[in-house]
Amino acid sequence: MADAKIAYFEEIMERYFRNDPMDALNNRCSEAVRRFNAWLEITTAELDNERAFIESKSSRRHEHEQVRRVKAFNERVGQYKREETRRRNEVEELQRASEKTFDAHKRWLEAGGLVQFSSNLNQFYASLHHETCRRQSTVESLSNIDRLKKIRNELGALIKARQENREDGLLIVPAILSGSETAWLIVDTGASSLSITPELVNVLGLEDRVGEEVEVRLAGGIRIKAPRITLPRVSVDNVEIEHIEAVVLKEPGPGIDGCLGMSFLSRVNYRIEDGMTQKLELGDEI
């Protein structure tokens, strides 16, 4: 069962994320159109030159030779039209297939496919950790956990890169929790506390440290209540802080595990560098 689920996650990563398949399809279509137009231009020029040559040689004296030339030229024009039709059909077929793939991807996104995929990935990752803790770990179970961890980190890095390429993109950083687990966190100076998902709490084995609900401030001044938790260690860009107050909140977005709020940032010297892409610079602990 684990192998089948991991294979499914791998399939989704390959289909929708790796090497940006939508860009790859677009590039294939553009290249096919470019090759077709180049062939059309060269072949049309060759036929025009041949027609001009035939017309320049027109005379009664060589009428038999001229008839032969015209016949050969007409045969070549026929071949050219058949080849043009074949090549044009190939390009149009590729464009139709690409449109179909784009439409399928759009429907998948609109139906919440990305959100569901990320949620299922994290839940299954947490459940495997839970099962491994309950039973004696095996080479297979540890291997499965490692495979899922790699998929999680790949997804987080891809989401981070996509946000960096957007004009209004979020600033996302990888944080190491308890020295072992990578969490992809949105940097948010408007949030009063660091937050992580319930799945990560389970992965870290910190369920017994989840406390009562406390009020926290989110971006935009929104206030909500969420269970509090103290994280033993949080490391960002090689700056490690111990005993960080945090809260447990559901996944804020696909590939994102929480928020790096002021309960961490207020304990270090930090600066957010603006530019084409934002960058978080951390100094010493305060």
Image (tube, grey):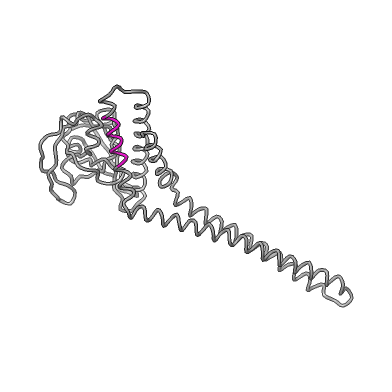
Where is residue 27? Give x, y as percent.
50, 53
Q: Which residues are magenta?
A: 120-130
Image spot of residue 119 (x, y percent): 29, 43
Q: State the quadrant of the N terminus.
A: top left
Q: Quadrant of residue 71?
A: bottom right
Where does residue 273 sit, x and y in percent of width and height? 29, 44
Who is closer to the viewer here, 214 or 10? 10
Q: Quadrant of residue 189?
A: top left
Locate the C terminus and report the quarter of the image it occupies: top left
Count the marks.
Answer: 0
Q: Nearer the viewer, residue 71 or 221?
A: 71
Residue sitting at the far bottom? 60
Residue 124 colored magenta?
yes
Residue 49, relative to residue 153: is it above or below?
below
Q: Is residue 82 left or right of residue 68?
A: left
Residue 152, given in percent of the width and then of the height, sits at 34, 38
Residue in view at x 36 percent, y 45 percent:
161
The residue at the far right in this view is 61
Q: Is residue 255 above or below residue 135?
A: below
The secondary structure that dominates the magenta segment is helix
- Asked whether residue 29 is drawn in magenta, I would say no
The single residue placed furthest to the top in the displayed view is 136
Nearer to us in this view, 35 or 17 = 17
Q: Is residue 80 left or right of residue 157?
A: right
* Residue at x 58% of width, y 58% of height: 90
Q: Is residue 23 above or below residue 261?
A: below
